Image (cartoon, rainbow, N blue to C red):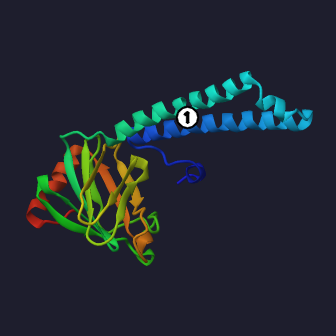
Amino acid sequence: MSFWGQLNLMDPASFIQSEMILFHDHALILLVGILTLVSIVGIKFIINKFNTRNVHEAPTVEVIWTIIPATLLLWLALPSLRLLYLSDEQGSEGIVLKAVGHQWYWSYSIPALDINSYDSYMIPSSELGKGEFRLLEVDRRTIVPFNSAINVLTTSNDVIHSFALPSLGVKVDAVPGRINSTGFSTDMPGVYYGQCSEICGANHAFMPIVVEAVQMEYFILMSKPLKLTGVFF
């Protein structure tokens, strides 16, 4: 991970995350502009010692500071509504991945491919290999095909967890007795890391999520023996 990646948002690996980063930059520019304008006006008041009473009574000024905030809110609201719509949109086609949160690990299954439920535990720091990430590596990764729609169904077996993959723009709560859904599609092959982002107990920080996106041919090849063994990766 680069130094810039530690300061800025993670590089996007999906269309929806790219849109989220664009909206973040859009909102940041707006906020910097507001801060600059308010600072300039405030400094001018201090330097010139304006009579604020007369300013408050000026009709032109009152119209301006009513219209400008309303315009700025529209500038934020319209792109955010579009982004919310894109985030909630889910197609009927695609691979269904079931993710169940436990204290403190995840269980996965892909019913359409007869991939039975398997558990994914964090690898302890003492067992990490060279180049592996502390608190992020798991003993069984979730393999999915890249550039394909993945519909994620989440629930929990005990308390509220949260299934989150920042680089894919995925974050959905796993609630006991309820099924929540979200979806993603990776733009490129690779390994994508996430963690439970809901405080779920003493070992909340030790239930990472690892999704590996591979070529469809490789995914199909890996899926074939799974129907016999019930073991994924």
Q: What residue is rendered at 74% in x and 36% in y?
A: 38
Q: Is residue 204 left or right of residue 71?
A: left
Report the quarter where the C terminus lies.
bottom left
Q: What residue is rendered at 57% in x and 54% in y?
A: 6
**Residue 69 in the image: x percent, y percent?**
61, 32
User: In the displayed structure, would residue 65 be above or below residue 122?
Assistant: above
**Residue 130 in the image: x percent, y percent?**
45, 67
Q: Quadrant of residue 63?
A: top right
Task: Let me know if residue 44 appears in the view.
Answer: no
Q: Is residue 63 left or right of residue 119?
A: right
User: Tag 1: Cα neighbours inside 10 Å, few (<14), some, or many (≥20)?
Assistant: some
Q: What residue is rendered at 38% in x and 72% in y?
A: 123
Name the residue nearer the viewer: 60 or 135.
60
Q: Secondary structure at mark 1?
A: helix
Q: Quadrant of residue 102?
A: bottom left
Name the residue nearer the viewer: 106 or 34.
34
**Residue 186 in the image: x percent, y percent?**
33, 43
Residue at the extreme left: 228
Q: Is residue 211 left or right of residue 34?
A: left
Task: Let me know if residue 21 appears in the view.
Answer: yes
**Residue 81 in the image: x percent, y percent?**
42, 35
**Amino acid type, residue under disc 1 in the picture:** His
Label 1 sits on residue: 26
